[in-house]
Image (cartoon, rainbow, N blue to C red):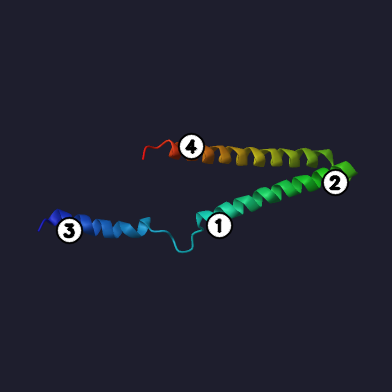
């Protein structure tokens, strides 16, 4: 029997728990859902601030800050969408 293969198997067994998912870790679906909820919340807050500013209840500084946050959120979502579409197109170009 080869001793090196025995050591390799032991090292693999020792490293295996490091590659397994943690039981309390968030899944990708829950993180994506959380990100979508944060995006919707940001847009709703910006809309509420804009409505308050049109009614004269909010200061212009708050309006500019809300618009900047919503613009950043939309740009982030568009960039993410572009990456997903690009990855999908790359998968379609793969030879079967």
Q: Earlier in the sequence, mark 2 or mark 4?
A: 2
Placement of the C terminus among the 4 image quadrants: top left
Q: What label sits on residue 11 in the rendered view?
A: none
Specify the farthest residue to the left. Answer: 1
Q: Residues within 10 Å of mark 2 (few under 14, many from 20)?
A: some
How far is disc 1 from disc 2 in space, using C-alphas?
33 Å
Nearer the N terminus, badge 1 or badge 3?
A: 3
The numbered disc on residue 30 is 1
Contact, mark 3 vs mark 2 (Cβ under 8 Å):
no
Q: CA distance from mark 3 to mark 2?
A: 70 Å
Which mark lies nearer to you, 1 or 2? Answer: 1
Report x, y in % for residue 77: 61, 42
In the depicted structure, whether residue 45 falls above or below residue 30: above
Mark 1 touches mark 3? (CB < 8 Å): no
Task: Identify which residue, 94 or 14, lies in the foreground.
Answer: 94
- Tell me which label, 3 or 2, sits earlier in the chain: 3
Name the secondary structure under disc 2: helix
Query: Where does residue 58 sit, x and y in percent of width and height?
Result: 85, 44
Residue at horizontal 65 percent and vertical 42 percent from the top: 73
User: Of the residues tagged 3 and 4, which is closer to the observer?
Assistant: 4
**Foreground label between 2 and 4:** 4
**Residue 2 visible (yes or no):** yes
Where residue 89 is drawn, which disc sits there? Answer: 4
Real-space CA distance between mark 1 and mark 3, rounded to the nearest whole angstrom = 40 Å
Q: Which residue is located at x 61 percent, y 38 percent?
A: 78
Question: How dense is the environment of label 1, judged by Cα within 10 Å: few (below 14), some, or many (20 and up)?
Answer: few
């Amino acid at each position: 029997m080869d001793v090196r293969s025995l050591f390799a198997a032991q090292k693999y067994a020792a490293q295996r728990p490091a590659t397994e998912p943690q039981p309390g870790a968030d899944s990708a679906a829950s993180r994506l859902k959380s990100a979508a909820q944060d995006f919707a919340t940001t847009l709703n807050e910006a809309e509420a601030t804009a409505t308050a500013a049109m009614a004269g209840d909010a200061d212009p500084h708050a309006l500019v800050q809300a618009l900047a946050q919503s613009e950043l959120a939309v740009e982030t979502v568009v960039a993410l969408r572009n990456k997903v579409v690009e990855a999908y197109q790359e998968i379609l170009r793969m030879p079967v």
